[in-house]
Image (cartoon, helix red, strand yellow):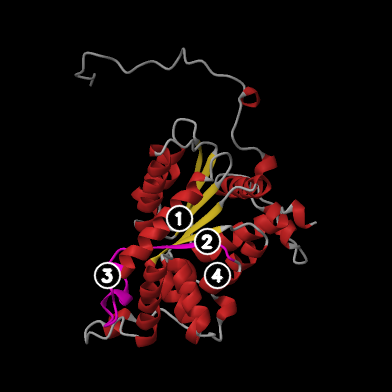
Amino acid sequence: MPSIYDSDALSLKEVKTYPLASRPSKVSLDDFARPIPSDSSLSDFLGSLPNILAVQSLKEVAARIHRARKLQKPIIWGIGGHVVKTGLAPLIIDLMKRGLVTAIAANGSVLVHDSEIAMVGSTSEDVDATLGEGAFGGADETGRLLNRAAQEGAKEGLGLGEATGRALLTLEPKNAAYSLLCAAYQARMPFTAHLTIGGDIGHFHPQADGAALGATTHTDFRLLAELVRRMDGGGVYLNIGSAVTLPEVFLKAVTLVRNLGHQLTDITTANFDFIQSYRPLTNVVRRPTADGAGRGFSITGHHELTIPLLAAELICTDKDSR
């Protein structure tokens, strides 16, 4: 039975083709992964990875971090609490010593988890088990430390990150070697802390002082903005594990710098997370680098995998250490 439609299907007889070998392609055998012998070195392993997509991005980010160090530009690691909870502080501290981290911007949960690791060697309570009885977030030492630091910092005009690092070291914590706050303070490296008031357990501690928390975190915002200003001409900002707070803070620091008439071009930004959320992609990767101002990258994966890979790539390609 013939078709009831008025039009015939389009004929394919005159379609033009070309020889496969003549076509430019984005992937070739040169980019493929290579099997890894059991006696491989770390450099061998990194060299065996496929030079495709995320691996290309990871290598490019590492190269730009090396370039920033050579140019003496800021290399700012913006981190969320999950970075500490997945045990990555020792890697970041090592990269600090190598000059591959020159500043840390943290949300409030970093202060909680990092200080608890320093004081007692453990962190991350079971919220489901304690929320029902209202015990969640009730650790006294954590709340006292963070709020005392804010109050003392506010009196002296310090930022919250610096004040907390100082207060924590004063306690002589037994696990200071694993603390980003302690390592940054001892190295005189900027550590800025950016709070969402009401978002952290210390904000409902009996000693909580909203004015002190606000004053010290605002000082840290202005300090971060100065660091962002210095990024012009080759600096790097990494957003690792903060889906809302730090992307918003970074974007406002960028606009403040430009509002004051400072140039901010040739910068590199990157977002590392296991979900690529709207704010990091928009406020870190895309907007600050738009119109030729720089290059943004997004690398998806669990921090406990991607950050050791980045650290390994940075160390194995570090020509200054050879």
Image quarter where the N terminus lies is: top left
> Residue flagged by tag 1: what amino acid is it?
Leu
> Residue flagged by tag 4: what amino acid is it?
Tyr
Residue located at (40% from left, 48% from top): 253
Q: Closest to the observer: 26 or 83?
A: 83
Q: Closest to the observer: 296 or 185?
A: 185
- Cα distance between the residues tagged 4 and 1: 15 Å
Give the mark nearer the N terminus: 3 vs 4: 4
> Residue flagged by tag 2: what amino acid is it?
Pro
- The residue that disc 1 covers is 223
- The residue that disc 4 covers is 185
Residue located at (41% from left, 50% from top): 250
Q: Tell me, yes or no, whether the highlighted magenta stretch contains residue 206.
A: yes
- The residue that disc 2 covers is 190
Position above or below: 145 against 25: below
Q: Which mark is residue 7?
A: none
Residue located at (63% from left, 62% from top): 95
Q: Tell me, yes or no, whether the highlighted magenta stretch contains residue 223.
A: no
Element assignment for label 4: helix
Q: Which mark is residue 210?
A: 3
Position above or below: 50 against 243: above
- Cα distance between the residues tagged 3 and 2: 23 Å
Task: Determine contact: label 3, label 1, CB under 8 Å.
Answer: no
Q: Which residues are magenta?
A: 188-211
Position above or below: 92 against 141: above
Give the mark nearer the N terminus: 1 vs 2: 2
Element assignment for label 3: helix
Q: Position of residue 269 (x, y in %)?
A: 50, 46
Q: Closest to the observer: 145 or 249?
A: 145
Q: Position of residue 91 (x, y in %)?
A: 60, 67
- Cα distance between the residues tagged 2 and 4: 8 Å
